[in-house]
């Protein structure tokens, strides 16, 4: 498709330094500078790729969990027996088997592609942080891009508490983007980090923050507290 969502049955995709410059039908004029560029025939169809900003990829091997009841925050279900036996337990076993991690990664990446996702995140396992080395395959990962033109994002799962605010600020200053779990729940326990941090005023600097609930804090915005 072009910028107006017109589907082009026979067309050209003009790319410069990793960015799409134009989409044209075959025979139409190409942008200046592309006149002598060689044409690579893909012999296929080019689709837009979806960007997934919150996943734990290795866990996509498992079946969907039949949650036994409704919870008001994420800290309530992580330690229950059902979760340990069906989610964390199996992944702990797999995380300790390097011979199984490579095929696991290829499988979950294929699931991404079949759903239209070409860029994702969430490449570490609690039982094996070294699992990230296997994610150099068929899906681009924002945490490990191996591309100097695509800065890598940082991640954080635990909430940020007041005692950790300064070190957290130091970490995000080293990244252009940070992905974190943020306010995942409905009760006062999930809101507690906000008033705890509100006593400090600090700036996000140049780092964009993207939370697990899709809250985005724009770059260089002065904040009172965290995640506003």
Image (spheres, grey):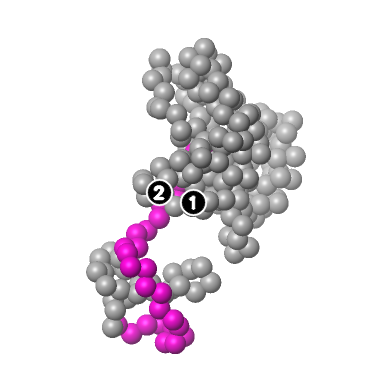
Q: In the rendered view, would you say 24 is above or below 56?
A: below
User: Toward the viewer: 52 or 90?
Assistant: 90
Query: Is there a contact, CB below 8 Å, between mark 2 and mark 1?
Result: yes
Residue 82 % position (x, y)? 48, 14
- The residue under the point 33% across, 85% down is 29
In the rendered image, residue 89, in percent from the top left (x then y), is placed at 55, 20
Is 29 above or below relative to 111?
below
Visible residue check, residue 73: no
Please state which of residues 15 and 85 is positioned toward the viewer in this rendering.
85
> Residue at (61%, 43%) from the top-left corner?
132
**10 Å crowding of disc 2: few (<14), some (14-19), many (20+):** some
Instruction: Give the overall secondary structure of the magenta segment.
Output: loop
Q: Which residue is mark 2?
A: 113
Q: Quadrant of the C terminus?
A: top right
Magenta span includes 175: no
Label 1: which residue? 139
Instruction: Report if residue 48 lies within the magenta region.
Output: yes
Marks 2/1: CA–CA distance? 7 Å
Quadrant of the drawing holding the N terminus: bottom left
Which residues lie in the magenta part?
28-56
For mark 2, give the secondary structure.
helix
Query: Where does the image place residue 46, in percent across and percent down from the top left?
Result: 35, 63
Q: Is residue 145 left or right of residue 116?
A: right
Mark 1: which secondary structure? loop
User: In the displayed structure, would residue 166 be above or below residue 71?
Assistant: below
Q: Is there any visible trace of residue 167 in the rendered image? A: yes
**Residue 77 image label:** none
């Amino acid at each position: 498709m072009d910028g107006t969502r017109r589907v082009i049955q026979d067309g050209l995709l003009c790319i410069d330094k990793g960015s799409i410059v134009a989409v044209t039908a075959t025979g139409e004029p190409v942008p200046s500078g592309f006149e002598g560029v060689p044409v690579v025939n893909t012999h296929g169809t080019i689709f837009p790729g979806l960007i997934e900003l919150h996943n734990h990829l290795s866990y996509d091997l498992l079946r969907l969990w039949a949650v036994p009841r409704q919870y008001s925050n994420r800290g309530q279900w992580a330690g229950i027996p059902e979760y340990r036996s069906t989610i964390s337990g199996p992944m702990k076993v797999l995380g300790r088997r390097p011979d199984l991690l490579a095929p696991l990664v290829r499988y979950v990446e294929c699931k991404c592609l079949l759903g239209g996702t070409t860029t994702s995140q969430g490449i570490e396992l609690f039982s094996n942080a070294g699992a990230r080395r296997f994610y150099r395959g068929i899906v681009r990962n924002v945490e490990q891009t191996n591309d100097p033109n695509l800065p890598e994002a940082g991640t954080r799962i635990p909430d940020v508490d007041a005692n950790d605010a300064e070190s957290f600020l130091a970490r995000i200053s080293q990244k252009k983007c940070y992905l974190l779990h943020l306010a995942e729940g409905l009760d006062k326990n999930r809101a507690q980090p906000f008033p705890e941090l509100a006593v400090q005023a600090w700036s996000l600097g140049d780092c964009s923050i993207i939370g697990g609930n899709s809250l985005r804090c724009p770059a260089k915005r002065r904040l009172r507290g965290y995640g506003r």
